[in-house]
Amino acid sequence: LSLGDDELAALAAANDGAAFGNLVGRHQGVVRGFLRRLTKDEMVADDLAQESFLRAYQKIALYRGPDRLRSWLLSIAYREFLAYRRKQKRWSFLGIGGRDAYEVDSEEDAESGGMESPRLEDKVVDTMALNRAMDSLVSAEREAILLCEVHGFSHSEAAKLMGAPLGTVKSHVSRGRKRLQSLLAGGQ
Amino acid sequence: MMNNEDQLSALLREMPEQWGRDITDDGFTAGVVSQVVRRRRQRSAAVAVAGSIGGTVASSQLAGLANSEPLVQVAVAVLEPLQGIATPQFLMALVMAAVAGCVAWVLPNRV
């Protein structure tokens, strides 16, 4: 009998490590994928994912369902990402922290023709192409698309997480969608 | 026929499931679980050390603090060497010595 997320979360809150391991196994792909798209760096993303799950374990007693565990985990992961980005920015003036991997490097990528562009209507858009298109968005648009369009957060939830006005988030989503469509359809 | 808008939405919504299939591996889960166990041990150690201080720092207080990761490490690092000697009397003597030191330093400067 497989337990639901909420039951596993309740067990984990009662210090059941196996239940928490089960939750990690169940959601790690989504959390890591989310962070990989945000950071564009697999190693960093996996480190952040690990921290996110540890943070989730510490706060699991605060989780309030029902059926919102994935969103809850993604919120934690997004906050970890924001903290990482702040830290990177803080040290960037010393040249520490390397390339600003999440920042805009998209204009050149998209316009250099580095991305193959299968036509959307031919239904040959594969995951790789979509991932590359996502990476080509400016960071704010990518974050808004990931939160709202990929993971189903409402615009207002995303605005709260991103610390941005609602209207700004809506326009990021709209511009991001247009740009994705253009990229996937072979345009600029 | 589905238009591009709908198709893009569908593709975007499929991404998490795709990640779930492609990225999941047992090694990651094992890594997280072992970190959880390690941090739980640290927390228990901090609580045990607090207990040995004879109530000067209440175990429950430290257990509360121990929920924030950096504090666990500070608590363990600071309190562990004091284990066994940090009785309330010892800590009181420490405070009195500090006060006496301050007085001894302040008085000559004011005279």
Image: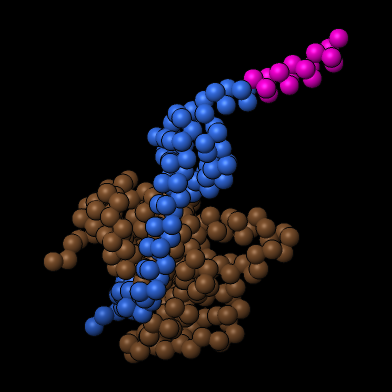
Query: Which residue: 43% across, 83% down?
Result: A128
Q: Nearer the viewer, residue A168 or A3?
A: A3
Q: Nearer the viewer, residue A90 or A138?
A: A90
Q: Nearer the viewer, residue A76 or A134?
A: A76
Residue B110 appears in the rendering: yes
Q: How many marks?
A: 0
User: Where A55 falls versus B59 (above or below)?
Assistant: below
User: Where A34 falls versus B84 (above or below)?
Assistant: below
Residue B74 pos. (x, y %): 56, 44
Residue A165 appears in the rendering: no
Residue A113 pos. (x, y %): 56, 87
Q: Give the farthest residue toward the front.
A: B84
The blue one among the chains is: B
What's drawn in magenta, residue-wise? B96-111
Q: Nearer the viewer, residue A120 or B68?
A: B68
Q: Give the farthest residue toward the left.
A: A1
Q: How is the image coloured?
A: by chain
Residue A151 pos. (x, y %): 34, 64
Q: Main secondary structure of the magenta part?
A: helix
User: Where A77 falls versus B18 (above or below)?
Assistant: above
The brown one among the chains is: A
Query: Which residue: 72% across, 59% down?
Result: A93
Q: Give the farthest residue toward the top.
A: B111
Query: Which residue: 52% across, 29% down?
Result: B87
Q: Residue A18: which quarter of the image?
A: bottom left
Residue A186 pos. (x, y %): 46, 86
Q: Is residue B17 magenta?
A: no
User: Where B91 falls versus A159 (above or below)?
Assistant: above
Q: Residue B11: which quarter of the image?
A: bottom left
Query: Which residue: 51% across, 86% down?
Result: A115
Image quarter (top left, top right, bottom left or bottom right) of the N terminus of chain A? bottom left
